[in-house]
Image: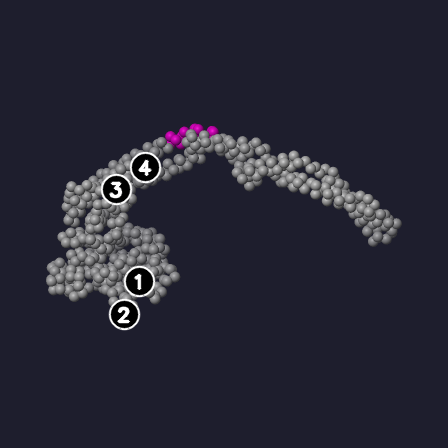
Amino acid sequence: MLSSLYISNLALIKNCEINFKKGFNVILGQSGAGKSILIDALNFVLGAKADKTLIRSNEKLMRVEAVFENLNEKIKDTLNSLEIECEDQLILSRTLNVDGKSTIRVNDIPVTTKTLKEITSNLMDFCGQYDNVGLINENNHLSILDHFIGDEVDAILEKISIECDNLSEIDREIKALGGNETERNRLKEILAFQIQEIENANLVEGEEEELSERFKFISQGENICEKVGGAVSKLDEGMNSVTSELFEAKNLLLSFSDFQDIADCQERLNSAYYEIKDVAEILDGIVKNTDFDENELERIDKRLDLIKGLKKKYGKDITEILSFLKETKERLDNIENSEFALNKLNVKKEKALKNLNDLSEELSSIRKKYALILEEKIKAELNDLQMKGTLFKVDFSRCEIGRKGFDAVKFIFSANLGQEMKDLSKTASGGELSRLLLAFKGIMLDKENVATVVFDEIDSGISGQTAGKVAEKLNKIAEFVQVICITHTPVVASKGDEFILVTKRSEDGETISNAEIIKGEEIVEQIARLIDGNEKVSSTALEHARKLLD
């Protein structure tokens, strides 16, 4: 249970410490005084998303610390598994600065938000006037029913989940083998077409580079003949060619072989003569062999376009395309030779589907059995809450089978005898929804395994004798768990064991909210204020408040 809450610089609260008792803790205060800030503080210290807009104006850091005592074994086990020492007391401390940086400590040990949520998941339960939005959402009804049933349904849901995983794996294996017969035939046609398209191309590694070079050469053939022919002419044709001049020059130096430097130069000129002569012959051969065959140019162009198209489909180069061809042949071969494996998988799938259906039938049977119990319990709770003659039913329909079985569930309701039952969202008023939510909460408490329940204006829209019944119900819940209740209803407030008043004042140009324990006549005055609604309460309201408290 929550024993104390310390708040610093959160919204309108500057510094405040509140002590709570076992039983029924009532939070009072005028609208706008800051009662909801206490809820924000609790949510924050329990691990809710850090919102730096909650930091008090002109302050750099907010801090909330909560102390819990009389911890249940589940929380102790969680703390032990995290190696956090615990002597029947849990101290949660969380800060947030204006830069958005948060620090969290559990019994003075730094932890992450994820770890904090793991620890606090079974500490408190919140039930507010807007929680009925979740109650009227049909998508939540199956989960609510399953939560009511508890372990019995959880065990089957776990088996169903395992069977669904098994089916997913079988489907993956079937898909790898080509899927069902229609899918397999379609895939075989695609693979066979791809194989034929690549094989018909008769690709050879390295040919693309050779073809590109040849295409470039032929497309520039005329220019090559002109320029290379000119080079040959200058090098080795006529009296003034390079080779003629070199031949004459090297011969002039022959008679000076006794002089080493001249002999070396003559040898080098001789080498240059034969080197240039060789170059000229090669270039001359190129000129003579240059063919301007337009048909060859067209053939090369088409071949390169074919290779380019195959590259777009099957790989960045011929090597990758040929590798793709090999893999595709193997894949087609596997599909064509996998009939036995596929038949085996289909038998396995049929068995898994039957198991899933059998488990879902079992689950549905359990749900329907407990749905009748839930209906009776809800009707009994509502009867206690001045809703006699109310009809409540868990309506079943069938949907596609999945991890939650094949049940689709919605709650239908009629508040008045003889009135047709309809969806909650279409027939229940705000006050009726509040009482229905309280009925569910009363039934589900033993499933929650929490020591503290916070009711935030759960009595909204309720008055008169009905409010008295709601008060009795909350008081009854407080016999089993610690209740913290924000209320504006006098009869609900009068059931409190501990009273906390939230007030708001202006001080030095700023607004400050504060919360403090009140006793004796101050309690009487605050409940009278709820009755009277005026700043100065009447003697009649005070007398009525005393009677309520008595």
Residue annotated with mark 2: 507
Instruction: Tell me if residue 343 is in the magenta stretch.
Output: yes
Q: Position of residue 331 (x, y in %)?
A: 49, 33
Q: Position of residue 355 (x, y in %)?
A: 32, 34
Measured in 3D between alpha carbons, the distance from the residue under mark 1 to the one under mark 2, in whole angstroms, is 17 Å
For marks 3 and 4 on the same chain, the one whose residue lies earlier in the sequence:
4
**Between 116 and 531, which is closer to the camera in this rendering?**
531
The amino acid beneath tag 2 is Glu
Q: Residue at x 74, y 38 (%)?
A: 288
Q: Is residue 278 left or right of residue 169?
A: right
Q: Which residues are magenta?
A: 334-348
Asked if labels 3 and 1 touch by Cβ distance under 8 angstroms, the answer is no
Residue annotated with mark 3: 410
Question: Which label sits in the foreground, 1 or 3?
Answer: 3
Residue annotated with mark 4: 400
Can see residue 329?
no
The label shown at residue 308 is none
For marks 4 and 1 on the same chain, the one whose residue lies earlier in the sequence:
1
The label shown at residue 10 is 1
